[in-house]
C-alpha cells in the first residue's frame, strides 16, 4: 500500500461524514421541523425523492465508470454538486427551497459514495481491505465530531461557554456554508494523491443495462444486496430521525444537548471503526457484519422503550460502535463477492439496494408518525420499533451469504 494514497482515500470519508452529521442527521431535520414550520413527512419526502434518483441512476453510472476505467472524474463532479447545494441551504429561510437544496445535496453525497467505495481496491490489497475500510470509517467519525464542533460558533457565536470573537451566531441556517467548506477542503487530498489505473475498456452498446441483468448470475451478491436493503431500511431511518427522536421522546433540549449526544456517540464510533476493521480481517467480513447487526438491533429495541434521558447517554455510544462495524464490514464483503474488474458495476447495485432502503424507511417513519398523531410521543416509539422487523429479516438473509 501507498500510505499517502490510503490516508487521502480515508480523508474523503472524513469529509463526507461531516456532511452526513451536520446536514442529514442534525441540522436539516431540526431546522425543517422546529424553525421552518415543516413536519416529519416533509423531510421524509425530500430524503426519499433524492434516494429514488440515486437508486435509478447509480447502477448505470457505476457500470459506466467500469467501462471507462475511471472513477475520480465522476466523483469530483458529485462532490462539487454536494458542496454547492449544501452551501446554498442556509441562504434563504424557505421550506420549499431548503427541501430542494437538501434533496440535491443528498443525491450528490450518496451518488459520490459509489465511486469512492469502488476506489478501495485501488489503494489497498485484498488482505488489507478490512483495515483500510475501518480506517476510513474511523476517520469519518472523527470528521463528524470535527464538523459538529466547527460549526457551533457559526450557529451560536460561542463554543460552549467561550465567546468567539467576530462571530455573532446566525442560528441553524449558519451551519451549512461552513459545512460545505469543510467537505470541500477535506475531500481534496483524494483527487491529488489517489492515482487510478489509466486503462480504458471498450464501450459496448447496451452494456450498462446488461449489468442490471447480470447480477442474477451471482446469487451470493443478490442475497447480500437483499440483506443490505433490509437492514439499511432501518439504519438510514434511525440516523435521519435520531435528532427528532431525542428532542421529542428523550427530552433533549434543542440542538445543544443533541450536539453533545452526537459527539460522544461518534467518539466511540471512531474506535469502533478501527476495531471492526481489524476484526473483519480476522473473523471474516460476514461474521463481523452479523455481530455488528445484532448489537445494533438490541440497542434500537432499548432505545424504543427507554423511559429516561439518562439511558440515551449509554445507548448513543453503543449505536456508534455498531454503526461503525456495519459500515466497516459490508464494503469489503461486497468486494470479496464481486468479480475482479466489476467493482464499480456492483457498487452501483450496492448503492441501489441501500438507496431503495432509504426511500422506504423514511416514508414509513413519516406515515406512521402522521397516522399515530393522536398517541402523542408514543407515535415515535411505534415508528422506531417498527424497524426491528427489517433488521431481523436482513440478518436472516445474510446468514445465507457465503463467507469469503
Image (spheres, rainbow, N blue to C red):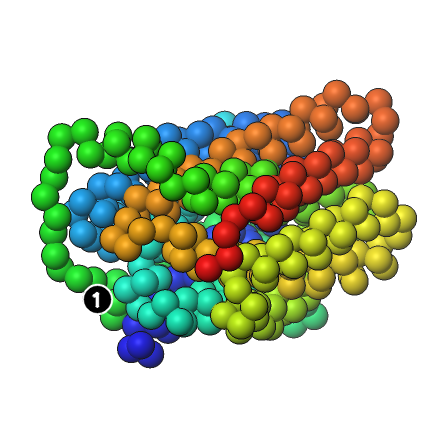
* Residue 371, x across and y down, in percent: 75, 20
The residue under the point 81% across, 50% down is 302
Residue located beneath label 1 in the image:
195
Q: Nearer the viewer, residue 225 or 149?
A: 225
Q: Which of 341 and 85 is in front in this view?
A: 341
Answer few, some or many: residues within 10 Å of disc 1's Cα (few below 14, many 20 plus, some between 14 and 19). some
Residue 145 appearing in the image: no
Q: Nearer the viewer, residue 190 or 248?
A: 190
From the viewer's perspective, tell me whether residue 333 is left or right of residue 383: left
* Numbered marks: total: 1
- Dividing the picture into quadrants, the one containing residue 162 is bottom right
* Residue 252, x across and y down, in percent: 78, 51
Quarter of the rendering occupied by the N terminus:
bottom left
Residue 226 appearing in the image: yes
Q: Is residue 283 above or below residue 354?
A: below
Q: Is residue 49 above or below residue 187?
A: above
Q: What element carries label 1?
A: loop
The residue under the point 65% across, 59% down is 291
The residue under the point 41% across, 67% down is 129
From the viewer's perspective, tell me whether residue 261 is left or right of residue 69: right
Q: In this view, does 245 lie above or below 273?
A: above
Q: Which of 207 and 366 is in front in this view?
A: 207
* Residue 149, x across and y down, in percent: 58, 65
Q: Is residue 180 above or below residue 389?
A: below
* Residue 194, x across and y down, in percent: 26, 67
From the viewer's perspective, tell me whether residue 234 is left or right of residue 229: right
The residue under the point 12% across, 48% down is 201
**Which residue ends up furthest to the right in the rendered image?**
307
Amino acid at each position: 500500500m501507498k500510505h499517502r494514497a490510503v490516508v487521502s482515500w480515508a480523508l474523503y470519508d472524513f469529509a463526507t461524514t461531516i456532511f452526513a452529521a451536520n446536514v442529514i442527521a442534525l441540522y436539516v431535520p431540526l431546522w425543517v421541523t422546529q424553525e421552518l414550520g415543516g413536519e416529519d413527512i416533509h423531510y421524509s419526502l425530500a430524503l426519499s425523492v433524492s434516494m429514488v434518483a440515486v437508486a435509478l441512476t447509480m447502477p448505470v453510472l457505476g457500470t459506466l465508470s467500469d467501462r471507462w476505467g475511471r472513477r475520480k472524474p465522476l466523483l469530483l463532479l458529485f462532490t462539487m454538486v454536494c458542496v454547492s447545494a449544501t452551501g446554498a441551504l442556509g441562504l434563504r429561510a424557505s421550506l420549499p427551497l431548503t427541501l430542494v437544496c437538501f434533496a440535491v445535496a443528498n443525491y450528490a453525497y450518496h451518488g459520490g459514495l459509489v465511486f469512492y467505495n469502488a476506489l478501495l481496491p485501488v489503494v489497498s490489497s485484498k488482505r488489507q481491505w478490512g483495515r483500510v475500510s475501518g480506517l476510513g470509517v474511523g476517520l469519518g467519525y472523527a470528521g463528524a465530531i470535527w464538523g459538529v464542533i466547527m460549526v457551533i460558533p457559526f450557529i451560536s457565536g460561542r463554543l460552549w461557554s467561550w465567546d468567539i470573537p467576530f462571530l455573532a451566531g446566525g442560528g441553524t441556517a449558519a451551519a451549512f456554508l461552513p459545512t460545505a467548506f469543510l467537505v470541500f477542503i477535506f475531500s481534496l487530498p483524494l483527487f491529488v494523491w489517489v492515482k487510478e489505473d489509466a486503462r480504458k475498456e471498450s464501450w459496448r452498446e447496451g452494456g450498462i443495462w446488461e449489468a442490471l441483468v447480470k447480477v442474477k448470475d451471482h446469487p451470493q451478491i443478490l442475497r447480500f444486496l437483499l440483506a443490505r436493503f433490509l437492514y439499511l431500511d432501518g439504519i438510514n431511518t434511525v440516523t435521519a430521525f435520531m435528532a427528532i427522536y431525542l428532542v421529542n421522546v428523550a427530552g433533549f433540549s434543542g440542538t445543544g444537548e443533541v450536539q453533545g449526544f452526537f459527539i460522544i456517540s461518534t467518539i466511540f464510533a471512531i474506535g469502533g471503526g478501527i476495531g471492526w476493521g481489524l476484526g473483519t480481517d480476522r473473523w471474516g467480513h460476514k461474521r463481523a457484519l452479523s455481530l455488528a447487526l445484532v448489537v445494533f438491533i438490541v440497542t434500537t429495541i432499548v432505545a424504543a422503550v427507554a423511559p429516561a434521558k439518562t439511558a440515551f447517554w449509554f445507548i448513543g455510544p453503543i449505536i456508534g460502535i455498531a454503526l461503525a462495524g456495519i459500515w466497516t464490514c459490508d464494503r469489503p464483503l461486497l468486494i470479496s463477492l464481486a468479480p475482479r474488474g466489476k467493482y464499480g458495476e456492483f457498487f452501483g447495485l450496492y448503492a441501489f439496494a441501500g438507496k431503495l432502503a432509504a426511500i422506504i424507511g423514511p416514508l414509513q417513519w413519516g406515515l406512521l408518525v402522521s397516522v399515530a398523531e393522536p398517541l402523542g410521543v408514543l407515535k415515535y416509539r411505534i415508528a422506531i420499533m417498527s424497524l426491528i422487523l427489517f433488521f431481523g429479516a436482513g440478518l436472516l438473509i445474510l446468514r445465507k451469504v457465503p463467507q469469503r
